[in-house]
Image (cartoon, grey):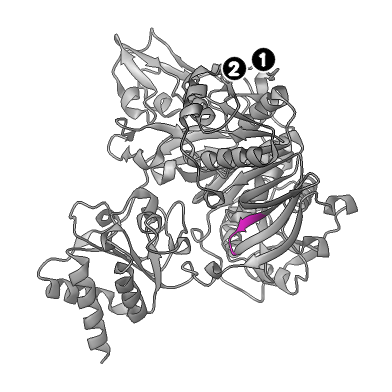
Amino acid sequence: MNIIVCIKQVPDAKDVRLDPKTNTMAREGVESIMNPFDRHALEEAVRLKEQHGGTVTVVSMGPPQAEAVLRDAVACGADEAVLVSDRAFAGADTWATTYTLGKAIEKVAPFDLILCGKQAIDGDTAQVGPGLAKRLNIPYVSYARKITGLVNGVLSLQRLMDDGYDEVEIPLPGLLTVVKEINEPRVPSLKGKMKAKKLSIKKFTATDIGADADSIGLPGSTTQVVKVFAPVFKGERAMLEGTVDEQVEQLLNKLEPYL
Amino acid sequence: MLRVDIEACIGCGVCEEECTFAAIEVIDGVAVVNEKCTLCGSCVDSCEAEALSIETKEKVVQADLSAWSGIMIFAEYRQGKVVPVSYELLGIGRQLADQQKVRLSAVLLGADLGEAAKDLIAYGADTVYQVDDPALEYFTDEIYGNILEDLALEKKPEVVLAGATAIGRSFIPLVATALATGLTADCTQLAIRPEDGVLLQTRPAFGGNIMATIECPHTRPQMATVRPRVMKAAPHDPQRKGEIINYKPQAERLQSKVKVLRNVLEEQDQVNITEGDIIVAGGRGLDNEKGFALIKQLADVVGGAVGASRAAVDSQWIAYPHQVGQTGKTVNPKLYIACGISGAIQHVVGMQSADTIVAINKDPHAPIFDVATYGIVGDLFEVVPKLIEKIKEKRG
């Protein structure tokens, strides 16, 4: 089974802070990491390969430094890595991103399955997986939390829903987005690390994938960001002072209407 | 591309400060852009020397945007019930429709829909397009997507909204891609710019650290998923009049390659922290699982539900369905009591709209106090038991 895993390099969101006074993200110490959900997608791909044979190819669209997450993925069990990178891709929304990834994946190799993380922790859109499936005209299932079987090219799985889960079957080729519950990702092996160091990463530019210039990057995007700002909070911040007894007494008076 | 006019640039550094992404820097007196630039445009607005511009090609505008009119919402129906976010969509949809002086329609898909369409009218819909078909018993992206795509193409609404639920966030991207139009996920504010009818879609990103306002200027419909429990539902008026249209999709549009065999309800829907008036929530300050017993006691005394921060859930002190925040649930209770929660932004975005927020924390500098209506700096293991005792006392 040939599996493609889509991976994004993201700033570690838990470290990102916007200073409300300067409207600037705190820059120090914000690490670039593999999107955590994608790590679970990668792990699932490697497990499927170990069970059924085949290859795992990781694909990332991003700036040149996104190579780091591809090497990380190879260290964790991927066989091949493709970096889709071009200045012309800058400013892409999910519409332009799915076009670009779709074009790149058509160039990579025939595949049976594409795995993506549920969403990236920077944009939190969860739109690239389903959009990519549509671009490639293959079926998809979002929020896979457990793969339960593979029989005659049909994958059985559980899809996480708001009220429980659905038992679902999807014929391959198809695409899944995965949630964290699906597995516990492994740490890179020494052998994997060696391989990651040596592997030459395939690089695709806009020309290489035959992308239409009007469909990529900012010009190819259907949405535009018009404003970025720090969230504003309306807390009144009335601090209740005194001994614990006094504090609790004041609080009880304030909360009278609710109790 | 972000262009810097080096003649005009005075090297003042305002853009450098404005840039959220550390993508622009003044080097030798001139602004220089690096690869972190996301083309968000903040610097362009900030530049008094007008030295910055974003170069875009003239867009081929989709034939006549004005041919698209009306607001359409997707009304989610699951387990024999309209999902509450659908009423919230009707609430915001009604506002937008009234502002634009257009009609508000709802798309209702399912099997054995009963009186659900009437209910949607009572909550503000002018028209309900319903498909009541056994093929819709379970949710499949393909069939739901086909029908919404066909209806959008036929009815040409300027705006299509759906709930940012598991279902909405799964199939709406398929519809937007099929319609070759823009989609904004998980919006918390929506407004229409009166001058040109463009929908301004505001949403949190980077785990809630940043808010971004997004528009879809050149294509229609403008599509958004909307975070549950943020918009207010319109009042229920059983006298409201509207039309119910039974829409008949083509047979091949009711086929899905993905098959759903069954739906299994899990315990988590019984822990519905999004519905109560009072939530008592605990975080890292509880130290361990036993700490939650105290939270539970307080919740019982005030008749509230138990919530938790991500830190507490990650430490496995309490199950995920209790998690409040960007990666958990958004709640909107009348009273939210946060005990031992530092107030990381990712938590705060999930509870900031509570009417009254009480924060109890040891650390006077904890950011939770910035959103609190009332704050107590103190040891929660002293404050909370005292609070429980006094409430009990009061009630005799």
| Type of amino acid under label 1 | Asp
What's the mark number on residue A208? 1
Residue B51: x and y in percent read 40, 16
In the figure, B388 relative to A213: above or below?
below
Q: Measuring 25% from the left and 56% from the top, which residue is drawn there?
A: B369
In the figure, A29 relative to A155: above or below?
above
**Range of residues picked out in magenta:** A158-163
Mark 1, chain letter? A
Q: Are marks 2 and 1 in contact (CB under 8 Å)?
A: yes
Q: Residues within 10 Å of mark 2 (few under 14, many from 20)?
A: some
Q: Measuring 83% from the left and 59% from the top, which residue is drawn there?
A: B247
Residue A167: x and y in percent read 69, 59
Q: Mark 2 highlights which residue?
A: A203
Question: What secondary structure is the magenta-colored segment mainly?
Answer: strand
Indicate whether residue B381 is drawn in magenta: no
Pick the quarter of the image with the C terminus of chain A. Answer: bottom left
Q: Secondary structure at mark 1?
A: loop
The residue sitting at the front extreme is: A191
Which one is nearer the viewer's eye here, A191 or B116? A191
Q: Residues within 10 Å of mark 1 (few under 14, many from 20)?
A: few
